Amino acid sequence: MRENGLLSKMRGDVADICHICVEEMRNTVRDEGVLIFFILVPLFYPLLYSWIYNNEVARDVPVVVVDDSRSALSREFIRRCDASPDVRVLCHANDMDEARSLMGRQAVRGIYYLPPDFSVRVNRMERTAVSVYCDMSLMLNYKAVYQTAMSVSQEMNAHIQVALAGNMTAREDELTTSPLAFTAVPIYNPSGGYGSFVLPAVLMLILQQTLVLGIGLSAGTARERNRYSDLIPFSRRYRGMFRIVFGKGLCYFIIYAVLGAYLSMVVPRLFDFVVLASPSALLGVMLPYVLACIFFGMTVSCLVRYRENVMLLVVFTSVPLLFLSGVSWPQSNMPWGWECVSWLFPSTFGIRAYVRVNTMGAMLPEVRVEYIALWFQAAVYFILACVVYRYQIVLSKRHVTERLERLRRKREVRRLLRENIVRRG
């Protein structure tokens, strides 16, 4: 008998959760704004980002040359720079003032200045210099302009060393130019591209922010229409908040289980970004991350009074959350206070775990800290979501009671007025 009663209770719990899930799915489908943030933005926004960053590196960055040397050696330096894939010599300037003017108008992104004694000092076996002025507003342009000048100067230095050494064999020339050989192997990002560096973090942040936007938009709509009173019969029928939060969370999980797979597996492969994740490790990271984002969004929805508020909140926090994740700025150099603030958001641990699993090929035990933190956040935000929804129901009951009291008073006033009119008549 006890087993039958327990089984019957479990069936009732599952039926209640499924009913709430279906109701929430209907409300989601009927709300165009929620559909935009739940479906359209996760589908097309990552494609826009990936398409922009698909070139990975900056090519043919325009530079201007100020050649005061006007020698064969200076012209050789300029030809080698122009022949590189990263830099394009757009024009020659007569002096630095003209070059600065082009730089100020953003016509060029860098300046190469060769002094008048450039060739003379080399022929005297003295050290000379090439001045490189870079536009630091974009690191990709700076990298292309500076590294091109460095590689060309090193190559020309090697030829000068060979010519002065007077070696007899090619092996001696090789030892003269590079006595200590080294091989540069860029791991995890072979092309050194910006897309493979930043896109994994952006994809995980898009998943969290669109969830918060959609859930907050739905909560704002409910407040504007005073629809939270609909939860009162739910709380009486389903005996507690766990089933309500579980049912709503199940609705969001069904939607974002598909979108999470699309963001983490499909988009990087569409644009040939680095993908080293094993299916088990990727599933182990994405499952707690999606759950933590869902319950985090349901908890944050208590701050949303109107539909527009959630958009301002998410737009304000998107860029700081990307910095706090430790992708664009080293986690070890982050102030302790901001590090503590970053622990409040699922995106911090989700981004770190996904980057290590997808880009670096880490397995689940190697991201154990992030894995445990995501499950902990999912549990904590689930409890907080239950508390928040319980608070909303208490407020709704209070509002309904006050409204009924006002209606009762109005009826009483009308009744007294009618009686007074009848007596006077």
Image (spheres, grey):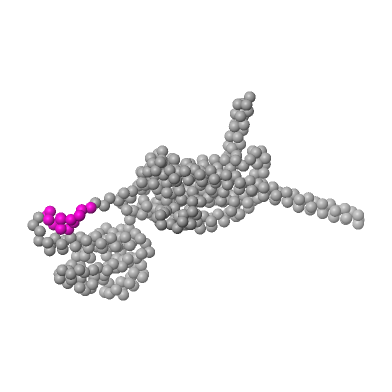
- Identify which residue is drawn at 58% across, 53% down: 303
- Identify which residue is drawn at 27% across, 72% down: 93
What percent of the width, then of the height, locates residue 238?
Answer: 64, 38
What percent of the width, then of the height, locates residue 67?
Answer: 23, 71
Q: Look at the image and tell me whether residue 37 can be seen.
A: no
Dividing the image into 4 quarters, which one contains the C terminus?
bottom right
Q: How many marks?
A: 0
Q: Is residue 44 above or below residue 363?
A: below
Q: Is residue 94 above or below residue 362?
A: below
Q: Which residues are magenta?
A: 170-182
Please tell me whether residue 173 belongs to the stretch shown in magenta: yes
Dividing the image into 4 quarters, which one contains the N terminus?
top right
* Residue 261 position by quadrant: top left
Q: Is residue 78 left or right of residue 396?
A: left
Please tell me whether residue 402 belongs to the stretch shown in magenta: no
- Single out the residue that lies furthest toward the left: 168
- Identify which residue is drawn at 33% across, 62% down: 142
